[in-house]
Structure formats: C-alpha cells, structure tokens
Image: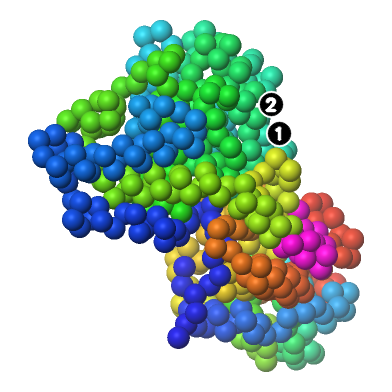
C-alpha cells in the first residue's frame, strides 16, 4: 500500500510524542482503541486557565496512518480552546492525510482520542 | 536510482534461479513444439524435455516419474488432490481430515466440499503449530477418504510429523495428501518412507518459474481421482491441457538444483538465521517466536515484537521486504488465522513479522536487516502507549478496551 507524503512525514518525524503527568489537574488524558484491534492511542492535553490547550502529547500503537493521525491532531489542537478542539472531525484528518478508505478508522480513532482527553479534563473540573 | 528493498520474504515467492532460466529459454523459441504432438520431431523433442523434468521432480520426492502430473501450481494441485479424491470415493467415503493452519487453498477446497455434502474435520494444532497425532487417530473413521496435512507451514515454517502421519493413514487405509509447497528443497521428502499418497508442490517457491507445479499421485496402491479440467486427456487424464514445456523444464531444473544443494543451503541458512535471531534478541526484550523453534525450516522466522504493531513496523523498515501477520496488510482486517490457531493472542498477532531467508540472502543483508529492525522497534516502543504501560507494570489485559 502506498502512503501519502504527509503520512510518511508524520510517521518518520512524529510531532509531540511523549507523556504529560496524568495526575496534574490541568492535564486531560484520552486512551482509545484496543490492542486486539491493532491500534491504541493515548492523547494528553494540558489546558490553561483560559481553556486553551497549551500542550499536547501522544503515544500510539498502530500502523503508520494511526501514528500520523494522532501526530497531526496534536499539532492541530495546540493553541485551540477545548471547545474549538472538540469540533475537529475525522473527515478533516482523513482528507488532510489522504487516507485510503481502509484507514478511515485511524482518523476516527484520533477524533475519539481528542474527545476522550477533553472529557477527562472536564471531569477533573466538574467537582461542583 | 532507487535501490530495491532487501528481499526477506522467501516463503512468499523466490526469484527464478539463473540456472533454471537458462534451461528454459530454448523452449520458448526454437524448441517450441507441442509436447503432445506425436507426428514430428518438434513434438518429440518437447516431450523428451517434459519427461526429463518429470524424472527430476520424481527424484526429489523418491517417486516414479509416471506418478507425477503437471499443474499450474500448488493451489491447483491441492484443489485436485482434495476435490478429486473426495468426489471419486464419495459413494463409500465422505469424510475428510485436515488441519486449521493449512494454506487457504486447502481450507477453501474443504469448505467447498462441505457445501457439496462432505464432512470435514479441522484438526487443531498445539501451541508450537504441530498437530497432535492422537487427535488424528481419533478423527479417522471408516468414512474417511483422505487426510490432508501440510508438510511445512507457510507462515511459521514448522514441520509436521509426516512419517508418523503417513503410518497412521496407511494403517487405517486412508489416503494421505500433503501440501509440500514449502517443504521441497528444505527438508528431505520421501513418498515411500513417509507413506504419502498425494503430494503437491510448487515451482516458484523453489527458485523455479511461476505458473507451474505438480501433483504426485500414487500408483501402488492406486489413488484415483476425478479431474477438475477435462479435455484432451493429458497427464493420464487427470489434468487436460497442453503442457507449457519451458515451465515444466524450469520446475524440473529447480528440483534438480534443490536436491543437490539442499544440505549445504540449509547449513548456510541456519547460520544466517541464528546470527539474525541472536542479534535481535540480544538488543530487544520481549521478542517472541511463533511456532516451534526446532521443528522448523531454517529459512523462516516468525517473530512477535510486543507492543509494536506489525504494519507500523513494516513502514519503518521499508528497506526490507518482509510480511506481517498483522491485520492491516490484508483486506480482511483480521490478524493471521495461523497465529491465532497457535493460541497467540490477537494483540500479539498484530505485532508479528515473518522473515524469510533464502538462496540469495547474504550475511551483510542479514546484519543490516537486524540492525534496522532493532532501531525501528526501539523507536516505535518509545512511541507506544502499551510499551509505556507495561514498563509501568500496568496489566494491559486488565484494562477495559473499547474494541472497535
């Protein structure tokens, strides 16, 4: 299967690989996918007092398209508010990376990862 | 110029040996006769070449040349053996025994026969990929016509106990068919000593041309079968159609070379494989071998690199031509059924690579391949959330994953 140049670029030079302290109140962690399905994404966001995502990190077990999708979304969500980040659609990811139909699930997983990270962050701040 | 990847996929196919190609060439041009033409020298010369090839093929399996029929490849041979025997004997016997790790063409032929009303027993395999002989004995009934167990598995390279299986089948009066596509030239094959009644082989797996194979069909005790392709009655009526002289000649020569060089080639391959395996395991933790390590052909390794997904890994080692048991490489999105049959967990099946060494593999290539894989596995593990969790002592199986 031929990968698009953008997928190869993100795979070979992934942006924002790493982990943030999951115990930090400002950090939201999303862990989606399943090892049995061949892909797992961990996406973490660090949100400031204005609700802006200051930092984002990912780790992904999966194929090149899964790695590229998660790398791409860390770039996209940095500097966005959590509300702006939560409306990113898998179709935008798939289109940007020119994913073939069999790899669409990778972009859906990346979208799920953003949602899960935001939800985790919101849960931490919904003590009222 | 773009250099080509290092070829480490010899179980998939092999390059045609230049010595094989050389013997084929005249039969494309000046020696173009139809080997079935009896009325002139063109035909006689082509026939002579085909019969020489038949002798060469018979020799590598210790058969009589009259017991060898040419086909288009092992897929056709397997189809003909199973469907041919099953249908010929169906009045009295309607049961077939095979094994879950067989090649798709055997399994799909069996599925087809089930639709035709036959009963099929699919024997499981042990964790090492080998069948349990007691289960085989127990599965045979007086309605069983044929047992089909492959000699060497195409994914994990394990060798089945052919002599023992042959003995059980002969004593029970049941035909024994083996798919030896991956075995010829790798392990000694002897239809007499192993009591094999039908044997499929393929040319392109043994450095011969693609598009040709053979089926051995025993004469004493005689095995009869219904043909799949009818016509001029060539190949003792079992497989009609004009033979391709150059392809037959190529397969014959490939067998000749395989017979002569097998012992030396195995020693070389074993040394290369051990070098590769030692290097990998000295630098990487949690590398698991799929299939029995000892009862295996020397040219095959099937390894799982825990917490690194196979397709992702292959993308990082694009300088190497290997294959993966991971789902993503096939359209089905299901990981290898062979690995699953060994009891390998789905998540581990996703992390597997099949590395195949062969006649033209060099020590430099093996060294380079091992280094490349080590570097890439380390890089991808650094990027893997599963690796991170396992390092933190988190039991990955205890997590409720949302399977999608």
- Residue B12, percent from left and from top: 50, 54
Name the residue located 74 percent from the left edge and 90 percent from the top edge.
A54
Q: Is mark 2 in CB contact (under 8 Å) with mark 1?
A: yes
Find disc 2 in the rendering and name its residue.
B132
| In this picture, residue B243 sits left or right of residue B78 | left
Q: Which residues are magenta?
A: B275-288
- Considering depth in this image, is B20 or B324 the residue closer to the camera? B20
Q: Chain of mark 2?
A: B
Mostly what secondary structure, the magenta segment? helix
Give the residue number, with chain letter if any, for mark 1: B126
The structure residue drawn at horizontal position 68% and vertical position 60%, both measured from the top left corner, is B272
Residue at 39% across, 44% down? B252
Question: From the viewer's perspective, is residue B393 above or below residue B83?
Answer: below
Q: Nearer the viewer, residue B177 or B352?
A: B177
Q: Residues within 10 Å of mark 1 (few under 14, many from 20)?
A: some
Compute the Cα span from label 2 to label 1: 7 Å
- Decide which of B102, B6 is in the foreground and name it: B6
Looking at the rendered structure, whether the residues under marks 2 and 1 are on a common chain is answered as yes
- Residue at (61, 67) in percent of width and height: B362
Disc tally is 2
Horizontally, is B135 left or right of B181 in the view?
right
- The location of residue B81, given as percent across then percent down, is 40, 28
């Amino acid at each position: 299967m031929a990968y698009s140049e953008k997928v190869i670029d993100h795979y070979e030079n992934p942006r924002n690989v790493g982990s943030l302290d999951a115990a930090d109140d400002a950090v939201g962690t999303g862990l989606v996918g399943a090892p049995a399905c061949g892909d797992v994404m961990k996406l973490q966001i660090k949100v400031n007092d204005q609700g802006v995502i200051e930092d984002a990190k990912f780790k992904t077990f999966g194929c090149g398209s899964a790695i590229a999708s998660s790398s791409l979304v860390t770039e996209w969500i940095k500097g966005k508010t959590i509300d702006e980040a939560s409306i990113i659609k898998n179709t935008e990811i798939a289109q940007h990376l020119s994913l073939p139909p069999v790899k669409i699930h990778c972009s859906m997983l990346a979208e799920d990862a953003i949602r899960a990270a935001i939800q985790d962050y919101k849960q931490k701040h919904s003590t009222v | 110029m773009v250099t080509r990847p290092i070829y480490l996929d010899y179980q998939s196919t092999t390059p045609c040996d230049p010595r094989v190609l050389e013997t084929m060439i005249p039969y494309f041009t000046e020696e173009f006769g139809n080997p079935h033409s009896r009325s002139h020298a063109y035909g006689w010369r082509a026939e002579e070449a085909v019969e020489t090839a038949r002798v060469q093929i018979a020799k590598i399996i210790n058969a009589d040349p009259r017991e060898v029929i040419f086909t288009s490849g092992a897929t056709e041979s397997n189809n003909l053996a199973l469907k041919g025997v099953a249908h010929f004997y169906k009045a009295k016997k309607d049961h077939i025994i095979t094994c879950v790790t067989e090649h798709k063409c055997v399994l799909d032929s069996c599925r087809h026969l089930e639709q035709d009303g036959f009963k099929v027993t699919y024997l499981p395999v042990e964790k090492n990929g080998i069948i349990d002989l007691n289960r085989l004995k127990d599965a045979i009934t007086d309605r069983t016509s044929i047992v089909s167990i492959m000699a060497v598995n195409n994914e994990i390279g394990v060798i089945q106990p052919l002599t023992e299986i042959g003995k059980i089948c002969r004593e029970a009066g049941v035909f024994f068919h083996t798919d030896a596509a991956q075995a010829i030239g790798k392990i000694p094959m002897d239809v007499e000593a192993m009591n094999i009644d039908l044997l499929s082989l393929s040319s392109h797996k043994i450095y011969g041309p693609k598009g040709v194979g053979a089926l051995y069909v025993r004469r004493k005790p005689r095995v009869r079968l219904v043909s799949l392709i009818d016509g001029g009655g060539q190949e003792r009526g079992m497989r009609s159609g004009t033979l391709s002289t150059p392809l037959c000649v190529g397969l014959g020569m490939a067998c000749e070379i395989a017979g002569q060089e097998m012992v030396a080639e195995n020693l070389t391959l074993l040394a290369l494989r051990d070098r590769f395996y030692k290097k990998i395991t000295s630098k990487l933790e949690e590398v698991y071998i799929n299939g029995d390590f000892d009862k295996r052909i020397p040219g095959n390794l099937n390894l799982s690199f825990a917490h690194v997904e196979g397709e992702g890994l292959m993308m990082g080692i694009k300088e190497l031509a290997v294959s993966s048991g991971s789902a993503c490489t096939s359209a089905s999105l299901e990981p290898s059924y062979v690995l699953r049959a060994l009891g390998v967990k789905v998540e581990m099946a996703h992390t597997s690579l099949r590395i195949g060494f062969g006649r033209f593999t060099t020590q430099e290539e093996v060294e380079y391949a091992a280094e490349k894989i080590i570097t890439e596995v380390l890089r991808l593990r650094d990027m893997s959330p599963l690796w991170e969790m396992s390092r933190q002592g988190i039991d990955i199986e205890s997590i409720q994953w949302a399977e999608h």
